[in-house]
Amino acid sequence: MLPLLKERGFAGLLTDPPYSSGGAFKGDRSAPTSSKYQSSAHRGIYPEFQGDTRDQRSYFAWLTLWLSRARGLVVPGALGCVFTDWRQMPTTTDALQAAGWVWRGIVPWDKTERGRPQQGRYRAQAEYVVWGTEGPRPLTGPTAPGVFRAPVPRHKHHIAGKPVAVMEGLLVPMEAGAILDPFMGSGTVGLACQAVGRPYVGIEVDAAYFEIACRRLQEGLNGASSQEEAGAI
């Protein structure tokens, strides 16, 4: 879908792609997403999602391809923000740079002590946003936190659902204009855009999650006090 969009028409990129993580070996990564990211008590609550079984080499190549295409769709100086976990953070930072973005840093999302405990180990309590810019960016505009602390939502719409508030915070330093989200999932970035009055274009390959995202976005529009712009592909 990305080649069909107008070049240089977006103010920023904010997205949460499948990590192809959840295990150290190919057999682990090939497992269903519900078994990788959910306890046995919660399996079957949410639909499975695609694109989470790549090995490291193919994951790097895939990230580089779509990040390169996305870079051509944003305005010069725009922010590009991509979620990842600790396993895939090195690969994600490499791919961001290979795609031509200027890597600027890492923003941790502290999931609080509600993150999954691991006996005899440190709690898996954080995920990360790798961020960069499309070329130079002047030191002007609002400042956002360098760490976001918010628990995983108790009521999620996606196996890997994230808080809308975190997405809202990530939008703060982005230029005014439409936000591109090539991995819409359940529409969380779109809801954050609605909350702050930003245009939004989301793309989603899974039909089940596409329907969930469209329903949530429509509910958000129906409940809004003013008309915000939202799109889904």
Image (spheres, rainbow, N blue to C red):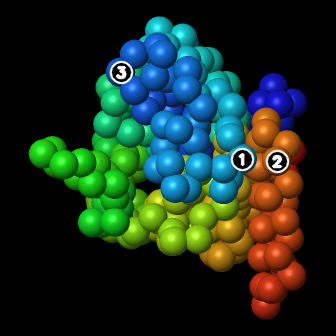
Task: Specify the quadrant that holds the C terminus.
Answer: top right
Q: Residue at x 59, y 71 (%)?
A: 155
| Label 3 vs 2, first from the N-terminus | 3
The one nearer the camera, 212 or 43, is 43
Q: Quadrant of residue 130?
A: top left
Task: Specify the quadrant that holds the N terminus.
Answer: top right
Name the residue that disc number 1 marks. 47
Q: Nearer the viewer, mark 1 or mark 2?
A: 1
The one nearer the camera, 56 or 53, is 53
Mark 1 belongs to which amino acid? Pro
| Label 1 vs 2, first from the N-terminus | 1
Looking at the image, residue 137 sits to the left or right of residue 160; the answer is: left
Q: Residue at x 79, y 58 (%)?
A: 212
Mark 3 belongs to which amino acid? Ala
Looking at the image, residue 9 sits to the left or right of residue 107; the answer is: right
Name the residue that disc number 2 marks. 208
Q: Secondary structure at mark 3?
A: loop
| Label 1 vs 3, first from the N-terminus | 3
Q: Secondary structure at mark 2?
A: helix
Mark 2 belongs to which amino acid? Ala
Work out how far the residue at label 1 is from the one at label 2, CA to CA, in angstroms: 7 Å
Q: Residue at x 46, y 14 (%)?
A: 26
Relative height, residue 218 to residue 26 (above, below): below
Q: Quadrant of residue 114?
A: bottom left
